[in-house]
Amino acid sequence: MSPQELQASLITKNINLSAEQMQQLQQYFQLLEQTNKVMNLTKITETGAVYLKHFYDSLTPLFYDRQLLQSQTLADIGTGAGFPGIVLKIANPKLHLTLVDSLNKRLNFLQKVIDQLQLTQTKLVHARAEKFSQQPQYRQQFDYVTARAVANLPVLLELCLPAVKVGGYFIALKGAHAQTEIDSAKSALNKLGGQIERVEKLELPEDAGERQLIWVKKIQSTPKKFPRKPGIPTRSPL
Ligand code: SAM
C-alpha cells in the first residue's frame, strides 16, 4: 500500500489526513527505517508493508469508534515502536497519548519520533504494565487503553484494564484467531470489571489478513490486587 493508497482508503472511512499528517507519517517511516538498521524495532521494513501492516492496521479502531477522533486520553501499552499509539496520535492530534513499554531503548526511539514530528500531549512511560497501572496517576485514568501484539487476551486484560476508567474502553487489536482467546477470557473479565461490548472483524487490503478488534468496556472498578506482580499475569493467567 503506497502512502497515496493509504490516504485514499482512509477517505472512504471518513478519515481525512492532511498533507501535514501524511508528512508526519513519512517522517515516522524514515525514522523507523533508519533506526531499524541499528536496533530491532520491526521485521516489516518495506515501505508498502509498513504503510499497510503498521500504519493502516493501527488506524482500524477509528473505522468503528468515532469517539477516538475526539479529545480523549489514551494509553498504548506495550507500544514497541509506537503501534498503534503514534499512528493514532498522528491521525488525531487532539489525543492525549501515553505510551508504555518495558524496554527503554524502544522509548528512546519514540522520544526521537515525538521530537521530530513535534507531537504534543504525548508522554512516555518506561514501566512494566503491571507496575504502571498500580500507580495512582495512571490507575483507572484513561478513556481508552490499546494494545497490539503484546499478550493473549486473558493476560492482556490484567495488564490493560486496570488503567481504564470506569465507563472507558480497552481495545485489543487481534488477528484471525481471537475467538479462542475470547472464550478463555471470561474469568479475567469478571475479576477485573470488564465486559466485551463488541468485536469487529475486518480484512486488511491486499489480502494481508484478517483482523479482529475487541472493545472491552470497563463496567466496574478493578480490585486493588490487580494487576498482580510483574510476570505473574503471564505465568498464571486469571
Ligand atoms: N504494540 C507494538 C506493535 O504492535 O508493533 C509492539 C509489539 S511487541 C511484539 C510487544 C511489546 O510489548 C514489546 O515492545 C515489549 O517490550 C512490550 N511488553 C511486553 N510485555 C510488557 C509488559 N508487561 N509491560 C510493558 N510492556 C510490555
Image (spheres, rainbow, N blue to C red):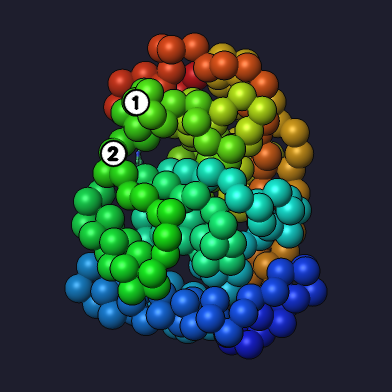
Q: Amino acid at mark 1?
A: Gln
What percent of the width, then of the height, locates residue 77? 43, 43
User: Is label 2 within 8 A of ligand 1 (CB to nearest ligand atom)?
Assistant: yes
Mark 2 neighbour class, 10 Å CA radius: few under 14, some 14 to 19, many 20 or more: some
Residue at 40% across / 80% down in the picture? 27
Mark 1 → mark 2, Cα distance in angstroms: 11 Å
- Res 92 → quadrant: bottom right
- Res 12 → quadrant: bottom right
Residue at 58% across / 84% down in the picture? 19
- 75 or 157: which is nearer to us? 75
Q: Amino acid at mark 2?
A: Ala
Q: Secondary structure at mark 2?
A: loop
Question: Decide: marks 1, 2 in contact (CB < 8 A)?
Answer: yes
What percent of the width, then of the height, locates residue 90? 52, 67
Q: Quadrant of the N terminus?
A: bottom right
Q: Give the labeled residue for mark 1.
A: 135
